[in-house]
Amino acid sequence: MNLFDTIVAPITGTEPAAVAVVRVSGPQSYAVAEKVFSPWHEPVEARKALYGTFAHGDDGIALPFAEGHSYTGEATVEFSVHGSRASVRSLVDACLAAGARLAAPGEFTRRAFMNGRLDLTQAEGVRETIESETEAQLRLANALRGGDLKREVAALREKTLHVAAVIEASVDFPDEIGEFDRDAAIATLLEVRANTERLLATARLDAIVRTGYRIAILGQPNAGKSSLLNALMGTDRAIVTDIPGTTRDTLEERLDLGGVPCVVTDTAGLRDSHDPIERIGIGRSHRAEASADLVWYVVDAAKGLDDEDRAHLTRLCERAWLILTKCDLANGDGPGLRVSAKTGQGLDALRQAVAERAGLGSTEGRWLAINDRHADHLREADTRLAEAVETLDSGLPVDLASIHLQSAAMEFGTITGETATLDLIDRVFRDFCVGK
């Protein structure tokens, strides 16, 4: 991949659409634009939109950006054109004929990283923003893209390198620097470790927000399981009747519950049955229960819990939430979340309970979480910091601690991309789509 070529690709979604945007970026982007768009004005006035006609006959807008002021950091032109497949394809073909080449997946963002417009965590934030399906995923992606993690990790790296520099200066220039203050250095490194471990604790939140929960809805026949699923979806997805045993198979649906992506499974009612088809469905209910992260055990509030319900809840232990349905028809207190599929009562509280369990309710306005790649390097950095503290505390020569600190700083730098290898950079960008 030659990062000095001029590249082109659509940067909007799949056609057809009302409007599509095609980006040309690189040293010859203005020359390409002059060949495919008319009238093209020289000298170019950056960030001033031009209206005209494209080489393939469509009309639209050309918006030039000067080097250093575009998404990629290069001279760039973004064309807005009618979003039919034919129009977009024809415009891209015209740009290719004018000297551009088709951008590789993620190449625009990779160039932004190489040109210092983004660090590696912000580039990951771009990808995660595109892939977001829930509000929580979007907010975590926005925090990455906005540089929140970059700033935190940069501060940890700076403090680590500062201690390493003081150590090296005290060894090289003992008369000018004076005696090295081990206690002050240890205090600084313990602070860095504490902040590193705080960041590591956010990995669980990222994993949950990214992959979500599998939730199985269990309960006896006619408890209101299917009605609950339909109410959460806002549509009649599952068949609901007064006849016990209506649901004879599992039904899975993806839902956004309080910002958490969830796969919710409606199941056959739990009871002893001689019907062979219903028994197969009950067997599948137990398999759904076994694979679930969370079980909603549903009970008709008007009937209350019986011995069979209590036995199931005891067996399920902490994984089970008691959900009392049809609460518009029954009053009373007691344990469990009270909901009504008919009136919608309690559904928001149920969604919020899922968010609280995921940890979203405790973010207090701070939306930052690390992914697996960040966690690997933070753990390695923390190990090296611990070794440096141990070295300083033991009275060994201080220059030995400097070796550990340089390793820790390299791990921090790998997160942001400052010390990342080409292979790691390739891995970060390989999952990007064309146009980003």
Image (cartoon, rainbow, N blue to C red):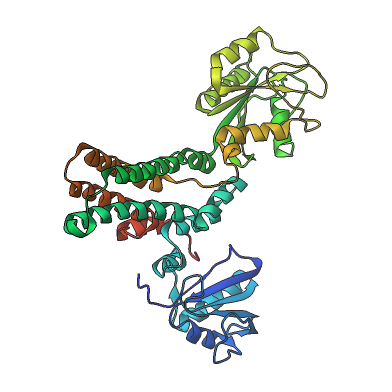
Foreground residue, 196 or 71? 196
Q: Residue at x 64, y 39 (%)?
A: 258
Q: Position of residue 189 (x, y in %)?
A: 33, 44
Q: Give the answer, above or below, for where 263 lies relative to 244.
A: below
Q: Is residue 7 left or right of residue 362?
A: left
Q: Is residue 104 left or right of residue 414?
A: right
Q: Residue at x 63, y 19 (%)?
A: 278
The number of numbered badges drawn on the structure is 0
Report if residue 230 is visible in the image.
no
Q: Give the answer, above or below, for where 416 lies relative to 92.
A: above
Q: Position of residue 410 (x, y in %)?
A: 30, 54
Quarter of the image where the N terminus is located: bottom left
Foreground residue, 61 or 197? 197
Q: Residue at x 80, y 30 (%)?
A: 342
Foreground residue, 319 or 116? 116
- The residue at the far right in this view is 329
Q: Give the answer, above or below, for where 349 lies relative to 210.
A: above
Q: Position of residue 104 (x, y in %)?
A: 42, 67
Q: Position of residue 151 (x, y in %)?
A: 45, 55
Q: Is residue 35 left or right of residue 236?
A: left
Report if residue 377 is visible in the image.
yes
- The residue at the far bottom in this view is 42
Q: Residue at x 22, y 46 (%)?
A: 401
